[in-house]
Amino acid sequence: MSIVSAYAVHQIARPTGFPSATDFTLVAVPVPSPAPGTALVENLLLSVDPYHRGLMDGGEGGFELNTPLEGRAVGRVVATRDPGLREGDLVFHRAGWRTHALVTLGVDGTRALRGHEGVPLEAYLSILGGTGLTAYAALTRTAALREGEDLFVSAAAGGVGTATAHIARLLGVRRIIGSAGSAAKVRHLTGTLGFDAAFDYHDGPVGEQLAEAAPAGIDVYVDNVGGDHLEGAIDVLREYGRIAWVGGISMYNGDRAPAAPRNLFEVVHKSLRLEGVLVRNHTNLQDELEDFLVPHLRSGRVGTDTTVVQGIDHTVDAFLGMLRGDNLGKMLVRLDG
């Protein structure tokens, strides 16, 4: 397989603030041949995620320049010397942002997909992927959401936000309040996704808007933003409330945000619990997540909630669009294949 027909996105410069398309380039390379113990995968779907932005700054664990970027992907095995994988198998792996990848079953999270009949491929990188697993762990483990409780979700129209809402409904939440970055997204939350209340954080102080949307308070906050959203949620949380802190959009790209909420001592005063959520610590929940959600995906009660961009040459566009908030649900890139 020496024909130059594989492509990979390389990072060629460190972003200063918000990334630019000129920080990346698309490189053509020979399609690799599998060595013993590996399989060649042709990627079908790529994920672009907020955590990529931090890795682009380099440092320990960060992306190296002039090498293929990595990310979650779903692909089909086209040649294999891995005894655990057969040609035609669909696999989840982390060698994304490229058209072809060499993978090994069980290494870096590579696994054969269970291939649930009636479930679209997009689900495996959204509600059944790291996005949904993050939301599921945040609600069932970190925050231990109970039936009849009230929930606030920030960045609620994004991938983790929409997954959180679906899962919370299935767990018996009473009310869901969401924040988003535009009037159109607010309408999507209340009109399509069934949020009980939602607000545009551009329309005024987050704390004031949240207090108006939840006058009786909330029990759980799933935080994808940090900053003023976290501060507002601490004010509105009831005694013994829980915060599952997933991400900090307000602090990406060198944006200025408070190092800590000004009302942080309320965590003590109200006996609140605040805990971070890293999906890599909850991979043992994958089968549990699928068993929980697949019947609802098949019935149509739960959707994949994705925005899909076509083509490896538009991967960077999709990433930058995700950072700008152009997507509804999870942002994915579909490759020809």
Image (cartoon, grey):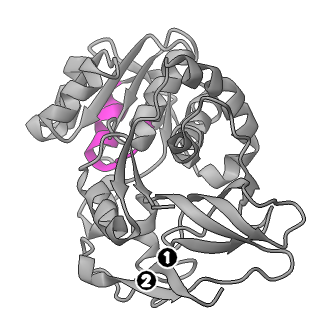
Specify whether 140 is left or right of 332.
right
Vertical comparison of 27 with 337: above or below: below
Mark 1–mark 2 CB contact (< 8 Å): yes
Residue 247 in percent (x, y) is at 43, 51
Q: Is residue 258 visible?
A: no
Quarter of the image where the N terminus is located: bottom right
Vertical comparison of 168 with 256: above or below: above
Q: Nearer the viewer, residue 49 or 143?
A: 49
Q: For the residue marked with disc 1, what is the amino acid?
A: Leu
Dot placed on the residue nearer the N-terminal end, 1 or 2: 2
Q: CA distance from mark 1 to mark 2?
A: 6 Å
The residue to which callout 1 is attached is 69
Specify the segment rendered in magenta.
Answer: 222-236
Q: In terms of secondary structure, where does tag 1 sit?
A: loop
Point 34% across, 63% down: residue: 319
Specify whether 234 is left or right of 5.
left
Residue 6 in percent (x, y) is at 52, 80
Q: In terms of secondary structure, where does tag 2 sit?
A: strand
Point 24% across, 25% down: residue: 198
Q: Nearer the viewer, residue 36 or 96?
A: 36
Was residue 89 drawn as part of the magenta stretch in this picture?
no
Q: Quadrant of residue 34?
A: bottom right
Residue 246 in percent (x, y) is at 48, 47
Residue 190 in percent (x, y) is at 26, 20
Specify whether 152 is left or right of 95.
left
The residue to which callout 2 is attached is 10
